[in-house]
Each structure stands twice: as C-alpha cells, then as structure tokens.
Image: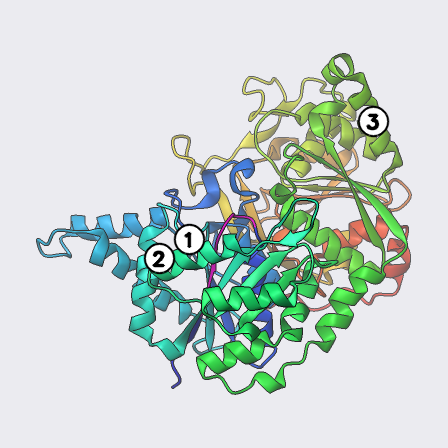
C-alpha cells in the first residue's frame, strides 16, 4: 500500500492571508486528480478547542458531526472538499499538552523527564499520522493525501513546538512523501506601486532556519506578480521560478483552485510527492457551476442579517457561505446588509438616531430577514423586534438557534399576550420562561458541555415546508450547539395559536423546527431551527432551509415547491 502523502501549508509575514482557502484549494486540485484527500488544522493556542472563544477572537466556531467545536477553516475544508471531518482534525496546543500530561499522570513515561522534545513533538506527529489515516469521504480505506495547515505565522513563539514537530515529521515520513507550501505577502508600498519581496524573503529565511524548506511559494498580492518579482523571489528563496505562485485577488474564492491550476501547481505538487495522476485534473465543472456562476448572477435579492458581531463577517462565515450556496442554486445575486441588533432598540433611537433610522430602513428594504445564532443578552431585544417586524409585515424570516428562540419569545409576548416572556438566559427570574436551560447541561463548566454535533430531528408532518425542502418524510440529521431550548410547557399553547413545531427530537420533547401554519396565506416563509443548518451546506448542495429562505425572498418558493415530487424515502445512516 502506498504511503500517505502530506502537504504542509505554512504562513508568513502576517496572519489572515488566506492559508485556509489555499489549503482547501490544494485539496480541490488533488481531489480532482483522482486522489482522496483529508485535512488537519493546527491552532497553536492553549485552548483545548475554539468553543469558549468569542467570535471576535477567531471568527465563528465551526461545529462538526461528532460535536467538535473547531476553527472556521475546517468549514472551508468541508465545503471545498465535501468531506466530514472530526474533532481530532483540529489540533491545538491545549489538546496536545492535555494528552501528554494525562499520559504522564498514568505513568506511561516510566519515570522519564517529560519534555517538549521529544514528548510533545512526538505526540504531535503521532496525532497527525493517526488522523491522516481516517477516511472522511464516506469510503473505506486510508486517504491518499493529508493537507495540514499550521495556523499563525512562522516565528511565533507559541507555534515553535509544532514547527519543530513538523521538521521531524519530514524525516519520519520521508522527503518524497511531504512538501511545504508557504503562503506569504507581497505588499505594494507607496504611490509608485512597486511589489516588495523583502517580507517574503525574511519569512522564508525564518522557515528555513527552523529546518523546513518550501516547495512552493504562494504569494498573496492585490495584483498578479510581475515576472521580475517572481524571479527575484525564486532566487532569494531558493525555489524554481515556476514554483512561485501568484495568488492575487480574484472575484470569488472558487477561482483560487483555477488560479493555481493555471500556474501548474498540481503538476509541481504531484511531482514532489510521487503522484502520477496530475494530467487527469479536470476543473471544468468547478469553473462552470461555481466560479463562473457566482460572477454571472444578476437578479438581486437583499438579505438583512441581524447580528451581534456584525463588525467581523468571519463571525458568521458559514451563514454567509450558506446564503451564497443558496443564491447560486436559485440563480439570484446576494446583496447582504448588516444590522447591529442593538441599533434597532429604543435606546439607540436616543443615543444615535441616524443609526437607528438607517437600521430600520434596512429592515424595510429587505427581501428577507435572518437572525443567526449567538450568546449573551446584548442586542436580544433588537432581534425580537426584527422577528416581530418580519412576522407582521410578512417578510421571509429564517431564525437559527438563538434566532428560533427569539421567534418563540416574540410570539409568546405578542400573540399569547405574555408581555414579560423571555429566556432564562437573559432574565433568570422571568415570570413566563419561553426558553429554558436544558437540564442535562453543566452549570459549572462551559467548554464542550453544550448539546453539540449531529442530532436527529423527527418531522411531525409531511405537509410542512421543511419536509418539502429537505425531501424527507421522517427525519433529518443536522448539527447543534446550544444550552437552552424552547419551554415544552408552552408548546401546546403556541401550536394552538398558529406556531407549529414541525420538527422535534427523538423524544418529542425538544423543539427543533418551527413554522407558521397556512403557508403562504399567513406568511410566505417564517421558519426557524434550533440546529445550525449552515454547517452542512455545500456548493452545489445548499442547505434546504437556506434555499427555501432565498427562494421565498426572491418570490420563487411556491413555483419551486410545485415542481418537486415529495416526500422521498428517509435519509439513511
């Protein structure tokens, strides 16, 4: 059996250059050459996982099927490669040290002094080899190639043990079985517009001093690299001129694999790794169905997202990607408007009337309103106002996780007449708890203690919009991340008043999907889910709830549903 091949993606100069998209694009090239690809992301922070970090720190927390709370780049890997990763696909300093210390406490090291080298570095290498051997595409057998992304920039103090481990790993697996792609920045300084190579030269110098020699340089820049710049980088960084890739700005991220293909990256990678199928690469379908289609969309649909972290779009990365996937399927051009939830509240009218008016204007002009997940009380009342506006004015509404709980609170207040209704997350002493803490969740520990990962939702009726969109007549499996749930004691009153819970968990006690009845007479699309449908959306296979939302927002849902035969047989596990 052929040895697993590895592609190590590192970064230099600054973070945020797009190493995740680069690593994903490398995976796309190799997959479309006929190889089975898996991915690993290394995050050098001490946190065990991303679950307890604010979205302002590292963007969204991406949830995996097995309940792992991971870096958002794992979402990029899953979407680009259509694979299903596990919690072990995201390595952190916290996980490695935790595992080594647990072994030390058990006495596994037989009295030895436990040190960063060799014990930590060996643990990192063993982890990589173990995870690289696990299939992630639903097929049996070991993947052919594992793409490893090292987070941060080379030279960071916190990543030093990982760089040393990866240096040793190159020796362990053999030079013909691993290559390094170094992503660096080629900035333009001053009005002259000259592309500067010195930052990349220094970055590669640091990398080589640590024992890793790059095979390819992936140079991020605003414009294509000039030939003279490419030659200079090749000379001073000790790579062939053909191995200096220009990863300049393009119209959408689906063009990055095409950009790498044009420069022969797949031939260079396959030659270095001893892979012989580079000539089989065919990205014509990728180009037509993703890259070209996105750029060709004309008919606009305006979606207003009511959020808490609107200053950082990465906090809602999977939501944005799911909207894009749905828009490509529906053939409409996404116009995404951001509204800070707190700016809709009465306090904002007094403190910043211009922002208040502008925010409400965005709601009025929206074709659809989306309230995504979130934690904490800031902006909650603004989200409730937005849900009320969408319901009363018959604007298509999609609520996700907290967005579903918001819809319930709004309905209890304004339809059932319990005006002090709230979630116990925001008002523990509320006399009318519409949303309550789940009894099985820890009250003392936050990390990894939520209801996480893929869970089954049983559809209660085949005539609901959700069943028609999912093309399922029994159940669906989606990923979750929450501590609070709709109060089951209020469900009979809510359903009697017109809010139906068409999806429930396997016990029937936990609400998963809500819809307003009598679509479209009462409302064109008012759907919310306790789960996070965005985490399983893929290009060409959009999340059904997002697709329904975009179709309703562009007034195409009814014709779409009439054209479908439903339901089909249930999803197999």
* SS for dot 3: helix
Quarter where residue 306 is shown: top right
Residue 273 inside the magenta-drawn segment? no
Q: Which mark is residue 154?
A: 1
Residue 522 in sight: yes
Q: How would you rate the neighbour count of disc 1 (Cα within 10 Å): few for under 14, some for 14-19, many for 20 or more?
A: many
Residue 427, image x, y percentages: 58, 20
| Quadrant holding the N terminus | bottom left
Q: Residues within 10 Å of mark 2 (few under 14, many from 20)?
A: many
Mark with earlier residue (2, 1): 1
Q: Position of residue 563 (x, y in %)?
A: 88, 65
Q: Residue at x 75, y 65 (%)?
A: 291
Q: Which residue is mark 3?
A: 358
Report the residue at 68% width, 70% height from top: 258
Numbered range of the magenta stretch: 7-16
* Above or below for 88 versus 307: below
Name the spot of residue 36 as percent of width and height, x first: 52, 76
Q: Which residue is mark 2?
A: 163
Q: Residue 353 appears at what percent x and percent y?
A: 80, 17
Q: CA distance from mark 1 to mark 3?
A: 43 Å
**Magenta segment: does it hold 11?**
yes
């Amino acid at each position: 059996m052929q040895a697993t091949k590895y592609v190590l993606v590192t970064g230099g100069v600054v973070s945020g250059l797009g190493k995740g998209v680069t690593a994903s694009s490398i995976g796309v090239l190799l997959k479309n050459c006929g190889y089975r690809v898996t991915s690993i992301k290394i995050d050098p922070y001490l946190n065990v996982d991303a679950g307890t970090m604010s979205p302002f720190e590292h963007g969204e927390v991406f949830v995996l099927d097995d309940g792992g709370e991971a870096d958002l780049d794992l979402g990029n890997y899953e979407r680009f490669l259509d694979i299903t990763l596990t919690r072990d696909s995201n390595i952190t300093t916290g996980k490695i040290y935790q595992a080594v210390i647990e072994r030390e406490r058990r006495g596994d090291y037989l009295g030895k002094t436990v040190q960063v080298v060799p014990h930590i570095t060996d643990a990192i290498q063993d982890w990589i080899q173990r995870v690289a051997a696990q299939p992630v595409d639903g097929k049996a057998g070991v993947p052919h190639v594992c793409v490893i992304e090292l987070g941060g920039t080379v030279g960071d103090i916190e990543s030093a043990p990982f760089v040393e481990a990866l240096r040793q790993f190159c020796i362990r697996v053999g030079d013909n079985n691993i290559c390094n792609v170094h992503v660096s920045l080629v900035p333009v300084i001053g009005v002259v517009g000259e592309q500067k190579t010195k930052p990349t030269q220094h970055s590669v110098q640091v990398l080589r001093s640590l024992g890793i020699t790059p095979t390819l340089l992936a140079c991020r820049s605003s414009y294509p690299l000039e030939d003279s710049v490419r030659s200079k980088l090749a000379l001073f960084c000790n790579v062939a001129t053909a191995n200096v890739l220009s990863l300049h700005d393009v119209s959408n991220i689906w063009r990055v694999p095409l950009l790498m293909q044009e420069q022969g990256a797949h031939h260079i990678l396959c030659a270095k790794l001893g892979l012989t199928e580079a000539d089989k690469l065919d990205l014509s379908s990728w180009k037509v169905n993703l890259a070209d289609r996105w750029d060709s969309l004309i008919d606009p649909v305006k979606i207003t997202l009511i959020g808490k972290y609107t200053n950082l779009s990465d906090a809602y990365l999977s939501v944005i990607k799911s909207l894009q996937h749905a828009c490509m399927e529906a053939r409409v051009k996404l116009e995404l408007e951001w509204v800070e939830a707190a700016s809709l509240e009465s306090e904002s009218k007094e403190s910043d009337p211009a922002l208040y008016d502008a925010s409400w204007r965005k709601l009025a002009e929206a074709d659809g309103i989306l309230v995504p997940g979130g934690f904490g009380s800031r902006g909650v009342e603004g989200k409730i106002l937005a849900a009320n506006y969408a319901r009363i004015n018959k604007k298509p509404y999609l609520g996700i996780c907290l967005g579903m709980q918001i819809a319930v609170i709004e309905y209890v207040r304004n339809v059932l007449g319990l005006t002090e209704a709230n979630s116990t997350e925001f008002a523990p002493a509320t006399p009318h708890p519409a949303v309550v803490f789940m009894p099985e969740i820890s009250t003392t520990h936050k990390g990894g203690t939520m209801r996480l990962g893929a869970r089954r939702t049983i559809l209660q009726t085949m005539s609901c919009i959700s069943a028609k969109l999912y093309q399922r007549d029994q159940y669906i499996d989606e990923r979750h991340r929450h501590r609070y749930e709709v109060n089951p004691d209020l469900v009979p009153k809510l359903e009697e008043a017109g809010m139906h819970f068409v999806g429930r968990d396997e016990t029937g006690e936990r609400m998963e999907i809500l819809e307003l009845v009598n679509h479209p007479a009462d409302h064109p699309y008012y759907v919310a889910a306790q789960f996070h449908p965005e985490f399983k959306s893929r290009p060409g296979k959009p999340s059904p709830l997002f697709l329904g939302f975009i179709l309703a927002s562009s007034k195409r849902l009814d014709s779409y549903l009439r054209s479908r035969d439903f339901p089909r047989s249930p999803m197999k596990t």
